[in-house]
Amino acid sequence: MIETAVHRSVTLGQTEKMPSYRMDLRQYKSQKEYEKFVKVNTVKDWSTVSWKDIGKPYEVTSFSKDKLDWEKERGETLPVHTSWTMFNQSFHEWFSKDVPAEIHEKKGAFFHSLKSFKPSEVKVALGDYLRIHLWNYVHRVQDGIWDPRGKRALFEGLDVQKPRILFLGAAEGYEAMQLSAMYPGGEVVMVDYDPFCRDTRFAEFPEAYPFLGVNPRTGGNKVYYKNDSNISYVVDDIRNLPYGKEFDIVLSVGLLEHFPDSMKAEVVEWHRKFLKPSGYIVMTTPRAQLRSKLYYEIMADVMNHTYRELMTLEQMGLYLYENGLDIMKHGYIKVHNGIVAKAK
């Protein structure tokens, strides 16, 4: 049992659904169980993979009402920075919900709408009810967005001690905090060019959320919290960062898929330019699978404010391989692809 003055008691191996998220401190009991969370190294030789064989990513073309209304009113394309501001604010609202209470509220609103005999009201209420149920399943039941066991499986085995970690497009910073728990004693620099991410998404990340990591004194398990990490948060465009090749880990989550092919090489270079010669690049992207396509359709108003692709693991890996990275480990974890690479 682990207790602090500001956190509720937690037990190693425990999982529990909280009002807005699932906490999960479970470990793998066997190799078979481990492989439920990350399927690793399915490609033996990346030089044999070709675009002709694997095709191009699936482009998501259903967009949020906010984006469409903005463009209709102004007669121009929504600027990228504005689109990210819209997305971050919309997405954060869902992380902040008391999900059981919201389900009860939306259920009541749906049945009330049936009494109106107005199809438009029923359609809106039904959509709200379906979306909160989907969010509950994806984030709170399956834990598919933060996905601690899958992310820990992907992140394990890095040869680093007290690493400096750079998180590009950090949003609330979840994955860097998980890495910091697994490789404690270092420093995390989070970067996002939307101040809302620092001032709200990161600032309001629950201090009671437990990250399973390593006790450097004993080699055993230890639970860490947000405030246990040495974190600085920079609000700036990645292209303006003053750092050199000084980070042991450069991380991005859901970044590569927001850029068309003409910019993929530049995005990969953003990671390489800040990496120590022996360092690791860690990247994830959403998987191209039926459930993900349905999710982005149903949650379009929440998720789709800018360019987005869904990739297979092979497509993601080929972008990195062709742009000068050696892929050390690759796999898929629930709804994400994940790759650990080094610069050639």
Image (spheres, grey):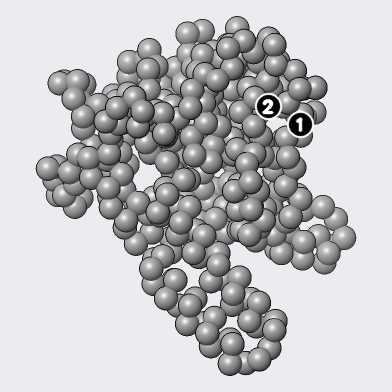
Q: Residue at x 38, y 68 (%)?
A: 100
Within 10 Å of the Cα at label 2, are there few (<14), some (14-19), or many (20+) other Cα atoms? Answer: many
Query: Do the residues under discs 2 and 1 have CB atoms within 8 angstroms?
Result: yes
Compared to residue 300, the image places residue 334 above or below, namely above
Residue at image mark 1: 56
Q: Residue at x 55, y 20 (%)?
A: 42
Query: Which secondary structure, mark 2?
Result: helix
Q: Which mark is residue 8?
A: none
Q: Nearer the viewer, residue 252 or 29?
A: 29
Please state the horizontal and vertical placement of residue 81, each as a whole percent of the image: 68, 47
Task: Identify which amino acid the numbered label 1 is placed on.
Answer: Lys
For the residues marked 2 and 1, what is the alpha-carbon distance in whole angstroms? 7 Å
Task: Identify which amino acid the numbered label 2 is placed on.
Answer: Gln
Q: Quick check: can you spot residue 45?
A: yes
Please state the horizontal and vertical placement of residue 75, each as a whole percent of the image: 87, 60
Query: Which secondary structure, mark 1?
Result: loop
Pick the quarter of the image with the N terminus. top left
Compared to residue 25, the image places residue 69 above or below, namely below
> Which of the 4 image quarters holds residue 230?
top left
Q: Residue at x 73, y 35 (%)?
A: 57
Residue at image mark 2: 315
- Specify the farthest residue to the front: 32
Compared to residue 62, the image places residue 65 above or below, namely below
Q: Left or right of 104: which side holds 170?
A: right
- Specify the farthest residue to the right: 75
> Which of the 4 image quarters holds residue 12?
top left
Within 10 Å of the Cα at label 1, are there few (<14), some (14-19), or many (20+) other Cα atoms? Answer: some
Please state the horizontal and vertical placement of residue 218, each as a whole percent of the image: 15, 21
Q: Quick check: can you spot residue 282?
A: no
Sequence order check: which comes first, mark 2 or mark 1? Answer: 1
